[in-house]
Amino acid sequence: MSERVFEDRAKAGQELGARLKNLPLTRPVVLAIPRGGVATGAALAEVLGAELDIVLSRKLGAPQQPELALGAVGEDGSVYHERTTQALAQVSDLWLAQEIRHQLQEIERRKAMFRAIRPAAELKGRSVIVTDDGVATGSTMLAALQTVRLQQPAELIVAVPVAPPDRLEPLRQHCDRLIYLQAPRDFYAVGQFYRSFEQLSDEEACRLLEQRWLATGRLVAESQR
């Protein structure tokens, strides 16, 4: 695929929505990985007329190199290890346990914040679309997929604007369908594929989630009565 640049996360989400719009989805729900993924997910959910929720996972960064992923931890405590990361072999069990505990504390902080806006969506028997603004190592996405799979969705779809080619196969192994807009060879960071890639604040992520919940929440509540 040829390399191109998205205007912003919302535009990328709209493009993903166009790709998914004609698929036979069962009561689709979009799960976004905060924070940046919420902007992509909100736009994607709007195109599909779908419910929007979040799924929490956090990267486990290497000592002195937090940008280097040793793996990731999901909101249910499940851990995905990057087995190909040499740094993982050099980290003590004690340090890794402390890093996992630290990231779980951050997950709990975010969970309290987002769940104050809306309850967790029911996923069993539904088409669940997990999205982010892009994939780099794929660790946080894979940890999120492990968590979601346990909730028995009818199908588990990964939808991302951009990912490096060598991460596509690991993603395919953990989902039923993979949708991506580009997989360029010259991949250094997700942000290089966006003109506007400012960090999304907690407040902005909450606002986007609340907007979509107000748009769909009453209908969801009524359908569950």
Image (cartoon, grey):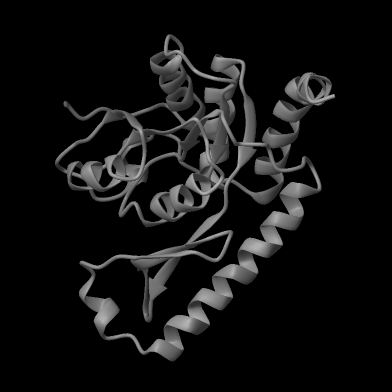
Nearer-the-camera pick, 72 or 37: 72
Number of marks? 0
Residue shown at 67%/50% (left/top)? 202
Counting from the top left corner in percent of width and height, residue 195 is at 39, 33
Residue 108 placement, left or right of 92: right
Counting from the top left corner in percent of width and height, residue 22 is at 43, 9
Counting from the top left corner in percent of width and height, residue 171 is at 30, 44
Relative height, residue 86 to residue 218 (above, below): below
Picture quarter containing residue 109?
Answer: bottom right
Q: Quadrant of the C terminus?
A: top right
Relative height, residue 171 to residue 211 (above, below): below
Picture quarter containing residue 224?
Answer: top right
Residue 183 placement, left or right of 30: left
Residue shown at 78%/18% (left/top)? 219
Residue shown at 26%/27% (left/top)? 4
Nearer-the-camera pick, 129 or 87: 129
Nearer-the-camera pick, 158 or 122: 122
Relative height, residue 75 to residue 1 (above, below): below
Q: Quadrant of the N terminus?
A: top left
Residue, far top: 22
Counting from the top left corner in percent of width and height, residue 190 is at 34, 45
Picture quarter containing residue 117?
Answer: top right
Residue shown at 52%/56% (left/top)? 57
